[in-house]
Amino acid sequence: MRPPKHSPLFLATTIMLAVMLLFAQPMRAAVGTITVIAISAAIGFGIGSVIGWLSHAYVANKPERPGVDLSSYAKAVFHNWEIYTQNKLGMIDFFTDLQTRMDLYYIRRAEYKALDYLSYSEPPMDIMKPVVSDLCQLQKQIITMVIAQFEEADNIVDNTFIGDLSGYDIRFSGAASLRNEEPNVKIVYELSSDNATIWSCELIQPIIGFSSGDRVDLSKYLVVSGSGTVKVLQGNTAFYVVKLVTGGSGTELELYALDPAYAQPDVPGWATMTKTLNRMIERFSEAYWQAWNFAVVYHQSLRQLGYTDRHQVPLHFICPPPDVAFYDLNDLAQAGMSQKDIASMYLVWMEQTAELLDIDVGCLMGSTNGSVTLTVTETATITTVVNGTTTTTVVTSHVIITPDNIEIPDVFTRLKDVQICINGTCFNATWVAIIDALGDVTFKKGQPTVLENPMRVLVEFPNGTKRIMDLTSGTTITPGDIITHSADGDISHDQYTYQVKPMPYWMEKWWNYPKPHFVEPADKNITALIQLVVSLMPLIILLAVIQLISSLGKRR
């Protein structure tokens, strides 16, 4: 242990008294008052010692450099973790509400699968496999994101609460101290009934054998019926609060409640983690059973009409989900396309399809391999007069609409770090993707381009917000860079001309994606197309939310 560092006042006093004592004898002859000097020296030494010691005690308890109080710093770190956790729960709540807009998507998924079981007198639960697969994927992403928050708390203890902060710890009440053990957090649904309906997310099939008191791991199973509640476990021990503590005794400094029974005034009970996840499970269950009920009615209706095989069903009775009407999403992902690429291309497909509603629309077509086409029917009446005889002829032409013959701009090439000026008002954008253009337009890196024709674009702002905008003629666009996302990586262009070409052209040019095969139309029904367009709308929302959840889940 180092001796205490004395203050300058203490040292000066000591040196002064030492000098006085050294010269005390000579001074006696000169002054003749040694007793007075010695007493004065002793008193001075005592006073100096006391003053010096008090000064040292004061100085020793002050930092040598300006800084924050350790306790307030530890509380601030823990508070930031609380805020980030609560923000994630708010996002989960928003996504839960957003799921109500996905009901039609899940219904179409179940109905389309029910076509495979028309030979059954009653539809099996297997018709729900596509819906369960989607819900399992979403639930797993959410649970992974929540667990990542507890792992982040462990990172705080391991990497922030060190050195002078090593006396601080984060503990799961009744379960663990993160300074002494690693987090092993599971989010489970504890059943309080024996009649639960549970699917395995790994096998995509129903699982039996669960009973009251069992804890169902929500990263592996989807609970679609059965009463119970969400619990958070460390190993096999449930905990309800996360605490910031200090000292070996574990003095509590801050508390974050996971359950409404322990909620603090600043966090209402409905906003706690268990309540938020319970609402998510309830919403997923509602979506599941709604899709099941519609699919059962659809299955029974077709059976009552005498159909026992999907190939017997007239095509205008078939309403496929969007992932059947569009290119297979798994194939696009396996080709290396990002969610942003797929979403941009899908958005353009919806844009072009929606424009068809201005025409007399025909039918939606299917084939044995599930591919889908649309048929637009244009009807014209021609009246001719020959030698006084009037003849009226109705001419009908058909246009087959598939992703193959929709012409779009290059959605894989986007403008980066863009300044957009409209009527003298300018703003910045991180990315700009062209959705629709009336003609070819050329952009040069770092140079302004004035639009000669209106253009519809998808703009991503610096704060992450995305918005579709219609830019008028005269708008000035200055890109900092022009980037193509392709199978070979990102490609930068000094100059690029946007042209409108069939969608497969761009997919083959940048991704070597094989051209799908579609069948010729055989029937028509305006209702079918309208249903398809409506069913297409939610998918882009689904794609964007999955990416957000995935990104947040990976953050640690």
Image: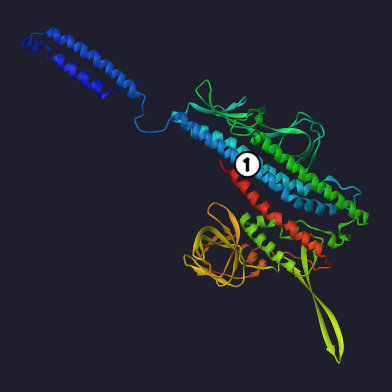
Q: Residue furthest left?
A: 30
Where residue 481 appears, as percent x and y from the top left, is 50, 62
Q: Is residue 475 above or below residue 380?
A: above
Q: Quadrant of residue 499?
A: bottom right
Seen at 58% across and 36% down, the residue is 151
- Mark 1 neighbour class, 10 Å CA radius: few under 14, some 14 to 19, many 20 or more: some
Q: Nearer the viewer, residue 76 or 292?
A: 76
Where residue 218 appears, as percent x and y from the top left, is 70, 38
Seen at 89% across and 60% down, the residue is 312
Q: Which quarter shows the C terminus?
A: top right
Where residue 172 appears, as percent x and y from the top left, is 60, 28
Q: Quadrant of residue 337?
A: bottom right
Q: Is residue 366 visible?
A: no
Q: Nearer the viewer, residue 290 or 260?
A: 260
Horizontal arrangement in the rendering, residue 393 relative to residue 150 (left or right) = right
Seen at 65% across and 49% down, the residue is 546
Q: Is residue 141 above or below residue 525?
A: above
Give the amino acid at mark 1.
Gly
Where residue 477 appears, as percent x and y from the top left, is 51, 65
Q: Quadrant of residue 370?
A: bottom right
Which residue in the protein does label 1 denote?
A: 90
Q: Residue furthest bottom?
A: 387
